[in-house]
Image (cartoon, helix red, strand yellow):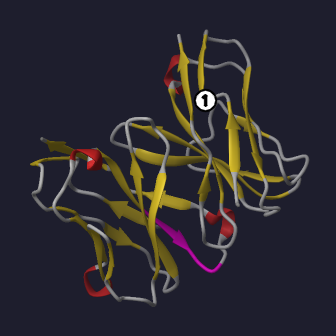
Amino acid sequence: EAQVTQNPRYLITVTGKKLTVTCSQNMNHEYMSWYRQDPGLGLRQIYYSMNVEVTDKGDVPEGYKVSRKEKRNFPLILESPSPNQTSLYFCVGTPNTEAFFGQGTRLTVV
Amino acid sequence: AQKVTQAQTEISVVEKEDVTLDCVYETRDTTYYLFWYKQPPSGELVFLIRRNSFDEQNEISGRYSWNFQKSTSSFNFTITASQVVDSAVYFCALILGPVAAGNKLTFGGGTRVLVKP
């Protein structure tokens, strides 16, 4: 069964404290993305990766980093979180034209 | 660039009423896929349907049905005889095919459905 697993599910942190949200997939596919969800704005792409060591900016990349050292994992890094990054985050695997979502990470930055 | 619009931000109905959620999309590509997702209060995204641009047949799955009309660039979703458990936010999304840069999903803003007993 295709799965995307992200952790943690919930996280409360303080402004400026670096954090990483992990994401792993078992589909052995190249395409992965991170999205953030905000009320009224739907989900917007932060970063995507088309393969190992190949990443690129999505629509709202400011304040985020990603890495793709291996196909399975695609962590989202917030070097210095700010309150405007309080949001619901989803890691998504998109093999071909399907989409497999992680469970979501609800991040609060105070 | 692609765009998906869900004009209804919130719909409130009484149980057993039918509810239709509108989704209008824009793309210059001829090959694309449309999705509907349900997001209950717990936050996860539940896949409902995926439809490719070459298949305009309407689909019914239990109380759910979808009406895809390329002529009006719409992919509307109807819940028949709504139930309280249908209360959620519903998202329409589009992805280009077969494989496009980033395989980006473009989402509408979502429609919150509240079904009252």
* Quadrant in the picture for the N terminus of chain A: bottom right
**Badge count:** 1
Q: Nearer the viewer, residue A35 or B84?
A: B84
- Vertical position of residue B99 compared to residue A74: above or below: below
Q: Which residue is mark 1?
A: A9
Q: Nearer the viewer, residue B101 or B62?
A: B62
Residue beneath the point at 76% across and 38% down: A75
Q: Chain of mark 1?
A: A
Left or right: B50 in relation to A104? left
Residue beneath the point at 67% across and 67% down: B101
Left or right: A84 in relation to A40? right
- Vertical position of residue B113 compared to residue A80: above or below: below
- Vertical position of residue A101 compared to residue B76: above or below: above
Tell me where the magenta segment starts and ends, as one range: B93-98
Q: Residues within 10 Å of mark 1 (few under 14, many from 20)?
A: some
- Vertical position of residue A19 compared to residue B14: above or below: above
| Magenta residues, dominant SS class | strand
Where residue B89 sits in the image (x, y, percent)?
A: 33, 46
SS under mark 1: loop
Q: Nearer the viewer, residue A25 or A14?
A: A25
Where residue A94 sits in the image (x, y, percent)?
A: 66, 63
Q: Could you say which quadrant of the image residue B116 lies in?
A: top left
Where residue B59 sits in the image (x, y, percent)?
A: 34, 80
Where residue A26 sits in the image (x, y, percent)?
A: 79, 55
Q: Nearer the viewer, residue A7 or B116?
A: B116
Residue beneath the point at 48% across and 86% down: B30
Residue A44 among those drawn in magenta: no
Residue beneath the point at 52% across and 18% down: A83
The amino acid at mark 1 is Arg
